[in-house]
Amino acid sequence: MNNEELSEIDIRMLQKWGNEERAYNFIKEEFQVINKTCFNDELPELEIEIRPMFAREGDILFGSSSAGAEYYAKDSVMEARIVLYSVALLEEELAVTVLAHEMVHYWEDFTKNLSAEYSYPEEFDQIISQHFKDGIKQQSWRNGHSRRFLGKISEVAETLKLSSKRILYDAK
């Protein structure tokens, strides 16, 4: 990260970890743990980027609605990747929660040819409705979070002992 462009959040993130390399090492280790624990070690490694907060503002201009992270599926130009903004790395539990959320997007994309049905707890509909008072925003969020995603995120939250509400929204 270029020091001239760092926000207060970027500086706090670097102070927490000591340097960017330590943050990357933590995220890479957690990816392995979550992959083994929640995905039977079936997800291939992918690029994980840590971006400063000013980059988030640019991504929002180009259509991203993410607060702390973004999953980008493989396309004709780029391999699949997860982007974590420094705000997601201010505390370890938040970093794990955000990473787990994005890994479920990756899992859903990676296993899209599997037709397994997933159900999710009824409380999720209440949590989603309470979070999004605006029906258009709720529908937009649901368009990026299928029933299959919600079923898997429920399993991941339970396995990792994470709050359902937090894994749904702190990552997005």
Image (cartoon, rainbow, N blue to C red):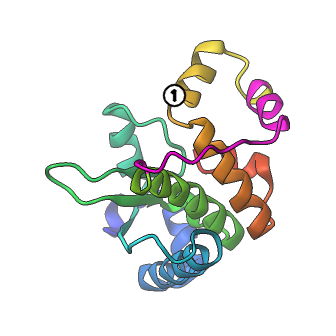
Q: Does the magenta portion include 153?
A: no
Q: Main secondary structure of the magenta part?
A: loop
- Residue denoted by label 1: 143
The residue depicted at 38 percent of the width and 74 percent of the height is: 45
Say if 122 sits above or below 19 in the image: above
Task: Using the image as rendered, state which of residue 171 and residue 145 is in the foreground.
Answer: 145
Q: Is residue 125 left or right of residue 39?
A: right
The percent position of residue 76, horizontal first and vertical second, equals 15, 49
- Quadrant of the rendered structure where residue 48 is? bottom left
- Quadrant of the rendered structure where residue 117 is? top right
Residue located farthest toward the top when viewing the structure as drawn: 135
Which quadrant does the C terminus fall into? Answer: top right
Q: Is residue 91 left or right of residue 4?
A: right
Q: Residues within 10 Å of mark 1 (few under 14, many from 20)?
A: few
Q: Is residue 109 left or right of residue 12?
A: left
The percent position of residue 165, horizontal first and vertical second, equals 77, 46
Q: Give the magenta-colored segment's residue range.
A: 112-129
Residue located farthest toward the left when viewing the structure as drawn: 77
- Quadrant of the rendered structure where residue 128 is? top right
Which quadrant does the N terminus fall into? Answer: bottom left
Task: Using the image as rendered, state which of residue 48 and residue 19 is in the foreground.
Answer: 48
Q: Does the magenta portion include 121?
A: yes
Q: Amino acid at mark 1?
A: Asn
The residue depicted at 80 percent of the width and 34 percent of the height is: 127
The percent position of residue 24, horizontal first and vertical second, equals 45, 79
Task: Using the image as rendered, state which of residue 169 and residue 60 is in the foreground.
Answer: 169
Say if 85 sits above or below 133 in the image: below
The residue depicted at 31 percent of the width and 58 percent of the height is: 80
The residue depicted at 41 percent of the width and 61 percent of the height is: 6
Say if 145 sits above or below 7 in the image: above
Task: Using the image as rendered, state which of residue 169 and residue 151 is in the foreground.
Answer: 151
